[in-house]
């Protein structure tokens, strides 16, 4: 959507750390989700519509919508965490605004407030159809940064 | 877990309506989830742990946990809805309390307050391992009853 | 903060309807809150810091912060409702990001999605001190529009 | 409502610590709220209905309902915290189920999961009228335990 400026870029190490973690998530692969954008404090995840992620009317299931929104927020927080830490979702709340009728959905997680222990993210999910975007879900999420012990 | 008494039973029509709707959800089948209990105002959904629903450490992904919790609440509300209506999740909030390390998880959706338009459910998800149960997620959900138009 | 353009203005009737409803809320008067901005889909409410709205350290209590955030969202939704309707908060979720240490706080409720029955608002609360603004709380809210019956 | 058994009792020190903190909250006094029960992991707060806490129809304002629910959960968590710590609400979500038409409301905060850093509470608010109780709000809350530094 927008041009990435230099300040918007994460280091190759952070990029690799996030992509590596994502690739180890069996669920994301099983759903067919992939990361399409990594910036400091913001990550996008895309999921194509197909029967395997649908609800009873053929639209993308709220469970799949929430799953990629949660992951987008988690990795957005992770871009700002120290090297040896890990991220856990404490909780999130999501409003489902419209059916996800497009060809794919795009979840955007954005850090609103980054603290030493807790981070708060905003979650948006858009349904995309031939370039036309509709907001289908909006959420708010709390994450915790777990620091690794020196001996681990 | 508990004995079903007569009052706890839904009619065969409601049972069939809910099982039929669930079976049309591609995501639930793709994840490997199934309904294990349907009572008036309460539905249980079970999901076995396997790589396809895991996060990076091999535990069940919060996205999968949330997906079946959301569905359990949705169908719990649906047991109390009129025949020609449908159910939509308005929003939910979920706290992830512990990693889902067990052999499978069980989501329990329970109606707290049933209104003509809106229903509020409580969501609990347990990790189960050889009969040992741990609460791994707890949530609260709002659902809306959509009445079908006569000509549909 | 920003100039109000013509499109940003609510009609004098809507303005009076909202101010009148607010003035009938004993709690808002008791807290010392007042409406400072009414635009279509957006309402601001301000609350000065004093002992009567404080927590144990003298900052504004999260309960007071939440109360004016909830009202700001409710009236933001109400600006877009039909004349004879009323508004009720279905639920909201709020993250408290920082202590409200300023001279006053300002809550901003903004409609994200306006539907016939349900409306979703974003809630922001800023702590303000000599023109310096800090985001102290962020939330998400669901409201319902209750239409009056003709005979009422 | 129920008998307090020996195991249900907090120590006089904890009782005094919580009552003392509550008494320093200007908002709780200004609203007319008071603590009516302190048990390990559970605190009740009561608020009488009067114009100063009402919304436009004379019922208790959702903002007042939420404020005492938030405090009940905060102090419930605090009963289980170490001596020199303090408690902060990270976030909460509340569903407003029915108007608070009774003589007073009673908020009950109960610890669901107590961790070293984070605690999750369930919040219930009842409207009480001549002994008749109705659930008017239900919520879920996350709190953080802040340990005091040795030099403080």
Image (cartoon, coloured by chain):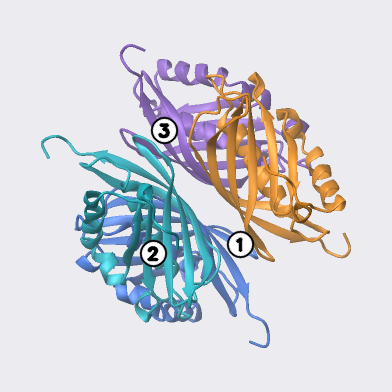
Chain colours: A blue, B cyan, C purple, D orange
Q: Distance between the residues labelled 3 and 1?
A: 31 Å
Image quadrant where residue B21 sits: bottom left
Relative to residue A130, is residue A18 depicted above or below?
A: below
Tell me how far mark 1 sits from mark 2, CA to CA: 20 Å
Mark toward the viewer: 1 or 2: 2
| B11 left or right, relative to B58 | left
At which x and y percent is residue D83? 83, 59
Q: Residue at x 41, y 81 (%)?
A: A24
The residue nearer to you, when weighing A80 against A1, is: A80
Q: Which residue is drawn at 59% across and 26% down?
A: D60
| Residue at mark 3: chain | C
In the shown orientation, is residue C72 left or right of residue D15? Answer: left
Residue receiving disc 1: A118
How many C-alpha atoms fall within 10 Å of the one at disc 2: few (<14), some, or many (≥20)?
A: many
Residue highlighted by disc 3:
C41
Say whether residue A103 is left or right of residue C13: left
Q: Mark 2 points at which residue?
A: A67
Residue B12 visible in rendering: yes
In front of the other: B69 or A88: B69
């Amino acid at each position: 959507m927008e041009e990435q400026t230099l300040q918007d870029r994460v280091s190759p190490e952070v990029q690799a750390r996030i992509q590596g973690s994502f690739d180890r998530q069996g669920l994301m692969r099983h759903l067919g989700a992939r990361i399409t954008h990594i910036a400091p404090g913001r990550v996008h995840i895309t999921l194509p519509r197909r029967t395997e992620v649908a609800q009873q009317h053929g639209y993308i299931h709220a469970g799949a919508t929430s799953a990629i929104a949660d992951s987008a927020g988690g990795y957005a927080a992770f871009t700002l965490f120290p090297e040896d830490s890990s991220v856990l979702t404490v909780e999130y709340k999501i409003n489902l605004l419209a059916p996800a009728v497009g060809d794919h959905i795009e979840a955007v997680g954005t850090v609103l407030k980054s603290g030493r222990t807790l981070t708060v993210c905003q979650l948006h999910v858009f349904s995309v159809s031939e370039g036309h975007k509709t907001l289908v879900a909006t959420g708010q999420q709390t994450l915790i940064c777990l620091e690794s012990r020196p001996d681990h």
